[in-house]
Amino acid sequence: MTLHILMLVSMFIAVIWTVLAPTLIGSALGLGITSSILTIIMFQFNAPLAAVFELSICTGLISVVFISTIGLSNPLSYTEMVKRKMNRFKRFIFLPLIILLIEIYFINNRLPFDFKPATVVSNHDVSTIFWNVRHLDIVGQIFLLFVGVIGVIVFFKEKERK
């Protein structure tokens, strides 16, 4: 239970970093770290298929697309970056307080926080379920990866000079 709380606290810190990061690259990296921590939590709660999808799509593909898009955009000057950082800080200063109040509400209403891991329905291993039962998920994941690759190619494609 202590490990679960530690992982949730670290994910909370990563989320706050993602929202309050001074640069877009920092926000994209914070999103990747948040997704990685969520993947570990999913593995701890016995959801390996969801964790694999989270790791491959959210942590990997989405982070690469965001970072490549940021790399193609125009960089901000120092004064613009400071101004953006202060505006973002002012906008989200109450976010930790709101989350804390929601947690206090849940604790006072005695809602269960001791979630039990999902049980395996059959005695098959993950690869059997993954390739034989959930094969449409694989098709969807391949499609999403293909779309991501096409997106990266479009981002890096240079226009022909006349």
Image: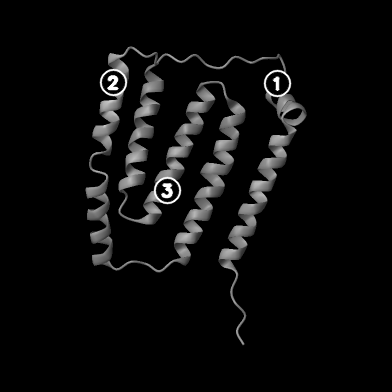
**In the shown orientation, is residue 69 left or right of residue 135?**
left
- Find the distance from the CA under tag 3 to the CA under tag 1: 33 Å
Q: Position of residue 27 (x, y in %)?
A: 38, 50
Could you tell which of marks 2 and 3 lies nearer the N-terminus?
A: 3
User: At x 30% / y 31%, what residue is drawn?
Assistant: 99
Rendered view: 6 above or below 21: above
* Three-letter amino acid code at the position of disc 3: Leu
Q: Position of residue 22 (x, y in %)?
A: 30, 54
- Find the distance from the CA under tag 2 to the CA under tag 3: 31 Å
* Three-letter amino acid code at the position of disc 1: Asp
Near-viewer residue (161 or 6): 161
User: Pointer 1: residues within 10 angstroms few (<14), some, or many (20+)?
Assistant: few
User: Pointer 3: residues within 10 angstroms few (<14), some, or many (20+)?
Assistant: many
Residue at the disc numbered 1: 125
Circle on res. 29 = 3
Nearer the camera: disc 2 or disc 3: 2
Q: Position of residue 148 (x, y in %)?
A: 61, 53
Could you tell which of marks 2 and 1 lies nearer the N-terminus?
A: 2
Circle on res. 105 = 2
- Find the distance from the CA under tag 2 to the CA under tag 1: 40 Å
SS state under label 3: helix
